[in-house]
């Protein structure tokens, strides 16, 4: 009772306010809930929080939350705690990372996203609040070209190719500038195996190379020539032969002319 009075010193909520506050908390409309505590002594901004594994979690870091069955990937921007019923509850706000399938109409508008993997994250302009009890783990999100192939199967490592603006429905950089390899021009996927051609230096998927994995293992230590270069080499050889043939014919022709002149 005493503590309730103490709270009343700072905040006077009407009956209607209280009803909204409780409802917004129940329905997890944290933005509304928090707005009632702004500029009161019941809300404290935090520089960092301790996770259940006693790791420090701070703004600019990335985290995974689970709300019901849904997982959220978030770049943290704000952390606060609010005193409710004489206990502190912590809330974390951040920008949401989309996965490929979160992009609206991606099958029609961005079919290339089909080539993304479960490790692909796209930072968006969308923000959301999470209650700290839904925090799952810290995650690492790296630019795809800095992604370490050795840690690929760790479940807290992700990579990113671009940011996504949900208002303009645009990627930055645009999909046309994302890294692709091989003749098939599929998006780079660090989980796939590639072999480099010794002639043109192009990286080719194992699966697109026309060779078995076993063959490739032996070849990769020696020399691999992609089928495009093999074709090119064949054509060059043919051209060379053609030129020789033409030269031969020319010589013959010249001789005939000379012979005719002599006549
Ligand atoms: Zn390929
Ligand atoms: Zn080649």
Image (cartoon, grey):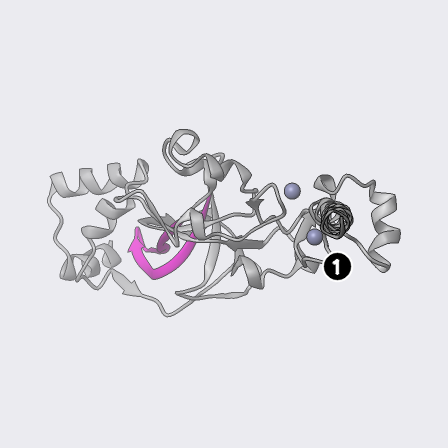
Quick one: 246 or 35, which is closer to the camera? 246
Residue beneath the point at 48% across and 38% down:
112
Placement of 248 over or under 75, stated as above or below: above
Residue beneath the point at 17% across and 62% down:
39
Image position of 40 (left or right of 215): left
Callout 1 crowding tier (Cα within 10 Å): few <14, some 14–19, many ≥20: some
Magenta region, mostly helix, strand or loop? strand
Residue 145 x/y as whole percent: 56, 61
Q: Is mark 1 within 8 Å of ligand 2?
A: yes
Residue beneath the point at 35% across and 67% down:
46
Q: Say which residue label 1 marks.
A: 198
> Is residue 108 something that shows in the picture?
yes
Residue 87 among magenta residues: yes
Tell me the magenta residue range: 72-96
- In the figure, residue 221 lies in which quadrant? bottom right
Q: Secondary structure at mark 1?
A: loop
Quick one: 203 or 15, which is closer to the camera? 203
Residue 202 x/y as whole percent: 65, 55
Name, please, the residue furthest toward the bottom: 47
Image position of 189 (left or right of 98): right
Residue 261 x/y as whole percent: 71, 51
């Amino acid at each position: 009772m005493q503590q309730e009075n103490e709270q009343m010193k700072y905040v006077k909520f009407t009956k209607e306010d209280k009803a909204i506050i409780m409802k917004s908390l129940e329905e997890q409309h944290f933005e509304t809930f928090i707005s009632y505590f702004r500029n009161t002594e019941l809300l404290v901004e935090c520089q960092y929080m301790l996770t259940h594994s006693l790791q420090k979690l701070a703004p600019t870091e990335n985290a995974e939350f689970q709300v019901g069955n849904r997982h959220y990937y978030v770049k943290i921007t704000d952390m606060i705690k609010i005193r409710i019923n004489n206990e502190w509850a912590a809330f974390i706000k951040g920008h949401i990372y989309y996965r490929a399938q979160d992009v609206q109409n991606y099958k029609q508008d961005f079919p290339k996203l089909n080539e993304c993997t479960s490790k692909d994250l796209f930072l968006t302009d969308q923000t959301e609040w999470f209650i700290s009890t839904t925090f799952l783990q810290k995650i690492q999100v790296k630019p795809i070209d800095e992604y370490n192939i050795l840690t690929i199967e760790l479940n807290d490592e992700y990579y990113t190719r671009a940011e996504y603006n949900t208002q303009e429905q645009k990627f930055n950089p645009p999909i046309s500038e994302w890294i692709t390899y091989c003749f098939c021009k599929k998006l780079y996927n660090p989980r796939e195996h590639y072999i480099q051609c010794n002639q043109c230096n192009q990286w080719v998927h194992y699966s697109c190379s026309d060779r078995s994995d076993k063959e490739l293992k032996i070849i990769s230590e020696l020399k691999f020539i992609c089928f495009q270069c093999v074709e090119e080499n064949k054509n060059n050889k043919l051209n060379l032969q053609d030129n020789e043939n033409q030269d031969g014919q020319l010589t013959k022709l010249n001789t005939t002319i000379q012979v005719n002149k002599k006549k």
